[in-house]
Amino acid sequence: MTQTISRKTLLAAAAMACLSNVSMADTTLGELANLKVDTTIYGFLNGQLESVQAQGGATPYSTRGRVSDGNSRLGFRGNIGVTDDLKGIWQLEAALNNFDQGGVNTRGESTTLSSRNSYVGLESARFGSFVVGNNDSVYRSLIGSGGEFGGNLGLTVHGLDVWNNTSAQMTGNADSIFGRGEARYKNSAHYLSPVYFGPAAGAVQVGASYGFDEDEVSNTRRGRWSVAAKYTYGPFSIGAGYDRQNNTGVDTDKLVQGYGFRTTDSSGVNTSFAKAIARYKLPTNTTIGLGFEQGKYGFEETAIPTAGSFYTTTTYGTMKQNAVMLSLAQDIGKASIMASAGKLFDLKGATFGKESDYAANQYSIGALYNLNRYLSPYIYYTKIRNHAQQSVNLGQAPVYSNNVGKDDAFLAPGNSPRAFGIGLIARF
C-alpha cells in the first residue's frame, strides 16, 4: 500500500533537521571558544664590554679586555585551552649565551633550542600547574634570587640580586656567593600551587620539584628534589625553601689536588641547601633585599693503607657553610642606582686546610638607564675576594685560569676576580 506524505509533514521534518544542525553548531562553537591557542615569542640580547682579571692564586688570570654575554635567550611559550579552567601549557627556551663567541663558551660547550627552561604540562586556576621537562626547580623559580624572586627577562625588576644576568651577578650558581642551591633540573617534574589569597589580603604560593637521575654514575642514584613557599603582602615578599641532592658530596680528592671546592657523586651522603629571602619596596622607590642560605655538604674520605695500618678505612661526615646577602636599588625616573654585597662564611668541618680558607665576599655597584621598556644601557663594577681555597667566580661570564677550552676548566683557588663593564640589553 502506497503512503502519501503530506506537505506539512515534510516541512516539520526539515525544521527539525535545521534545529538539530543549529544545536550541533552551537556546541562546536562552544568547544572552539574553549580551545583558545596562544603563542608568545620573547627574549633578550645582552652584551657587555669589560675589563676583567683574577689574581691571588697559584695561576693568576691577568688583566684583559673582552666582550661577554649576559645570559641572552630566545623563547617560545604558549597555552591550549581545554575547558574554562584547564589548559595545556608549553615552553621551549634556547640559550643565546656566548653569542660573542659564536655560541661556544670558554669550556668549549654549546647550547641548543631546549637548553634552557623547556617543558609541557597542564595548568588549572583551581589546582595549580604541573609540568615535565628541563626546568628550574622551585628553589630557583619560586624563591630564586633573580627577578622579584624567580627569574626575569634581564634587569627588568629588582630582586635580591639586582645585577642578575650580568658579570656582576652574585647568585644562582654552584660557584656564586649566594643561591648556591639554585639549579635547573633535567628529567624533572614540577608542581606550583595556585596563588592563595588570605583574609588579610596576603598571597601564598607553594611548590615542589623532583629531578630524576637517569645516568646513575658509579651506580649512585643522585635524584634531586626541592620544596619552597612564598608569601606576599603588598610591597613586602618573603620566601623559604629547601633543596637536596642524594648521593652527592664534596670531592675531597680534587680539593687536595688544587681544583678547589666542588661536589661529585658520593654514595651514602647528600648535599642540601636551606634559604630564606625577603624583599621590600619603600614608597620612595627604594627596594631592599636580604637573604640567608646554609649549605650542608656530605663527604666520604678514604684513608690509604700505610706501614702502620694495613687497612683501608672510610670516614663520613658533613661540612657546613652559611652565606648572607644584602641589596639596594633606588629608582630615579628612568634611571636605577643599584648595589649589592654578599659574604660566604667559613666552611665548618673542612677536611683540608683551615675553615677560614673557604670564605669569600663580593660587592657590586652600578647604574642602569631605561631608554624605553625594550632598551637599557648600564654600567657596573664588581669585585670578589676569595680566601686561599675558595673560587667564587663572576656571574654569567666566569673566568678560568686552568684548562681553558676544556669541560673541566676551573678558576684556581685563591684567585679573586673583578670586572668593570658597560652593557646594553635589548628585550623583545
Image (spheres, grey):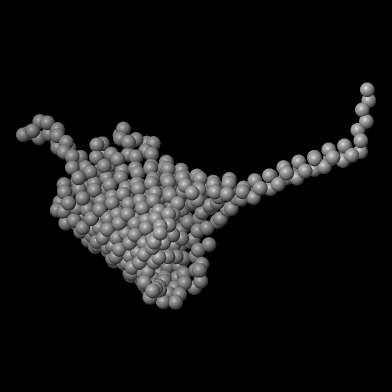
Residue visible at 46% across and 48% down in the picture: 128
In the image, residue 220 sits, relative to residue 411, either above or below, namely above
Residue visible at 61% across and 50% down in the picture: 36
Give the camera-side residue of 307 and 251.
251
Query: Is 133 displayed left or right of 296 in the figure?
Result: right
Instruction: Identify the residue at the far top of this view.
Output: 1
Query: Is 349 displayed left or right of 14 in the figure?
Result: left
Residue visible at 40% across and 65% down in the picture: 234
Q: Is residue 244 visible?
A: yes
Instruction: Identify the residue at the far bottom of this view.
Output: 333
- Residue 339: x and y, percent? 33, 69
Residue visible at 53% across and 52% down in the picture: 77
- Residue 220: x and y, percent? 30, 35
- Residue 226: x and y, percent? 34, 46
Query: Is 145 displayed left or right of 271 in the figure?
Result: right
In the image, residue 254 sits, relative to residue 71, either above or below, namely above
- Residue 348: x and y, percent? 17, 51
Give the camera-side residue of 131 and 325.
131
Q: Is residue 395 visible?
A: no
Where on the picture, by quarter, is residue 146?
A: bottom left
Quadrant, the N terminus: top right
In the image, residue 222 sits, relative to residue 126, either above or below, namely above
Instruction: Identify the residue at the far left of this view.
Output: 308
How many circles with numbers are drawn on the protein? 0
